[in-house]
Amino acid sequence: MDIKDTDIIGYADLIKIIFGDKCIEEFLVGRECDYTFAEVMQTAKENGYDESGIITLIAESPLAGKVFQYGNYGKYWVEHGGTIGYA
């Protein structure tokens, strides 16, 4: 499944955007996460991401979560797996 910049992450109470030595956390208690992958990239750039290296995105809720990465295989997002509960 290709992940497009305009795709929405989906339900999450917490997202973590991790790159370099930074971890940006956004708490989204009780609502649908309407962040797109383009918005995640913009947030990373605003916080110092210079388009080199890998971004790890963890979108999680009490029951499940998803782990995504950008830049590991090329300049695109991939879903790496899931969690049961918070990671």
Image (cartoon, helix red, strand yellow):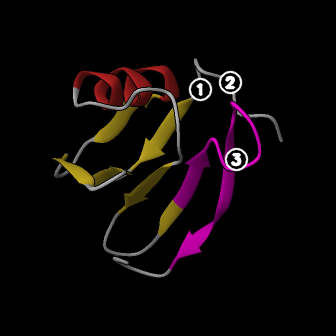
x and y percentages locating residue 49 in the rendered image: 36, 32
Whether residues under marks 1 and 2 lie with C-beta atoms below 8 angstroms apart, the answer is yes
Give the residue type that dot 2 points to: Lys
Q: From which residue to which does the magenta span run?
A: 67-83
| Image vertical order of residue 51 relative to residue 33, above or below | above
Crowding at dot 3, Cα within 10 Å, few <14 / some 14-19 / many 20+, comes out as: some
State the SS at label 2.
loop
Q: Which residue is mark 1?
A: 7
Q: Residue 47's mark?
A: none
C-alpha distance separating marks 3 and 1: 12 Å
> Image check: 18 left or right of 1?
left
Give the residue type that dot 3 points to: Val
Indicate the quadrant containing the C terminus: top left, top right, bottom left or bottom right: bottom left
What residue do we see at 24% from left, 22% from top? Answer: 46
Give the residue type that dot 1 points to: Asp
Mark closest to the chain's N terminus, 2 or 3: 2
State the SS at label 3.
strand
Report which quarter residue 26 is drawn in: top left
What residue do we see at 41% from left, 48% from top? Answer: 11
What residue do we see at 34% from left, 40% from top? Answer: 32
Q: Which residue is mark 3?
A: 78
x and y percentages locating residue 82 in the rendered image: 58, 70
Front residue of 81/18: it is 18
| Image vertical order of residue 87 relative to residue 61, above or below | below
Crowding at dot 2, Cα within 10 Å, few <14 / some 14-19 / many 20+, comes out as: few
x and y percentages locating residue 5 in the rendered image: 60, 21
Q: Residue 85 in magenta? A: no
Magenta stretch, main secondary structure, is: strand
